[in-house]
Amino acid sequence: MREQNNNVPAIRFEGFSGQWFTHALQSVADVLDGDRGANYPNGDDLQVSGHTLFLSASNITSKGFMLGVSQYISEEKSNSMGNGKLVLGDIILTSRGSVGHIGWYSAEISQQVPFARINSGMLIIRSKKQVDPSVVAQFLKSPAGKKKIDLISFGSAQPQLTKMSVSTYTVNLPKERDEQTKIGHYFQQLDTLIVQHQKKHDKLLNIKKALLEKLFPKQGATEPELRFKGFSGAWEERKLLSNFERIIDFRGRTPKKLGMDWSEDGYLALSALNVKNGFIDFNADANFGDQELYDKWMSGNELHKNQVLFTTEAPMGNVAQVPDNQKYILSQRTIAFEVKKKLIEDNFLAVTLSSPLMQRKLSSLSSGGTAQGVSQKSLASVNVLVPKDILEQTKIGNLFKQLDTLITQHQTQLNKLGNIKQACLEKMFV
């Protein structure tokens, strides 16, 4: 254990000072591998439920410990094995294939999965008493920790880490256990918030998916399974394009063709890369045009709030709506629909284009190999089922608009928390 010069993080909890120390991992933790012997589980031993979770690559990912699709072994099989059984506080490190993924067998995880074993593509890092395991886990996730993992991994087709290289891997940690615990607890709180928002986000996505199936007619039907009170009767089948006054499509238009170029700021260009399913990603492929470019590009074709946007290729079929009354440039591989207001409502159109049945229709029409796309000509052959009563359309559209708003709020919060965590991992470790 030796003290380094300037071995101090940029951000620190109040009341702590002094140099951090650099340790070989084996001096503060035991590095253990799993059982590779005759009793190693084969396909016949693995079950979808059971006594002991037998960890696979799907359980330890870049997002940490995941309990989605899992495989189990019996208690008898587990007892017949040697190394690799987890105890509370263990850190799991993936050592083959996608190396460097970290899972922490915390109290919360162990309550859900009281018995677990690692497979042969993982290592266990079991902290000794003088070190808080949570701070070791977070150091391994930090940019400094990941960089060191990259340096000791080998192999190109299937990168690997050895037990020996991980044992001699160096970690930088505060000397005082109290500081270690504060850092670990802080990141636990961040991770808990991230998990909570992720669960709410995923739940809302599942609700939306279920409602899309129930509130729209299935293939061959003319009425949906679920309906708002007061509405009945068959939906009307129409040509999709009959619902539009016009389609705004600047296919092939670029700043250079207008004798200009993008600017550092100004009006955001909405392209197929920042029109996502249900929202606009303001950070993806962000190009901007100044007033002169906007006037030349959009004159007489100005977009308005809630207007439906549709990506025609790369990727094909993403649907979003203009989020506000700000001015935007309609850019590559994205079109906008100007609806006939007596026939179809903007929010309903957005949901209709996102529905599973419509997405399947669009996929069947798409052309191209790696970059599939649809043209206005192919859209002309598409029929759509629409409620005759514009009020029913409005109710359906508003419901999904509210769902999309909640989904976007949770996604925004997830992105914000993820950025905070990444910044803290960079600043709170050395």
Image (cartoon, rainbow, N blue to C red):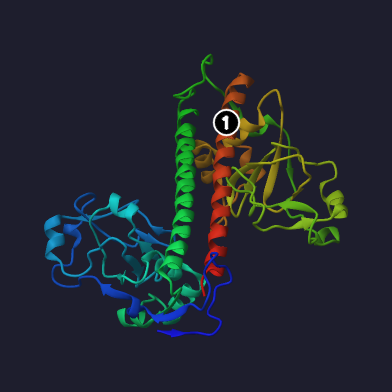
- Check disc 1 and give the amino acid type: Val
Q: Is residue 122 left or right of residue 152?
A: left
Rendered view: 291 above or below 337:
below
Q: Position of residue 133 (x, y in %)?
A: 36, 66
Taking the spot 61% from the left edge, 43% from the top edge, the residue there is 319
Rendered view: 287 above or below 357:
below
Give residue 59's quadrant in the image: bottom left
- Depth check: give the residue in front, 109 or 349: 109
Judge whether residue 43 can be spotted in this image.
Answer: yes
Rendered view: 179 above or below 68:
below
The N terminus, quarter of image: bottom left
Give residue 40's quadrant in the image: bottom left
Give residue 279's quadrant in the image: top right
Taking the spot 67% from the left edge, 24% from the top edge, the residue there is 343
| Residue at the disc numbered 1 | 384
- Depth check: give the residue in front, 182 or 429: 182
Q: Considering the numbered disc 1 on the image, is that residue within a helix, a strand or a loop?
A: strand
Q: Position of residue 187 (x, y in %)?
A: 47, 59
Rendered view: 315 above or below 149:
above
Q: Position of residue 396 (x, y in %)?
A: 56, 27
Q: Is residue 385 left or right of residue 199?
A: right
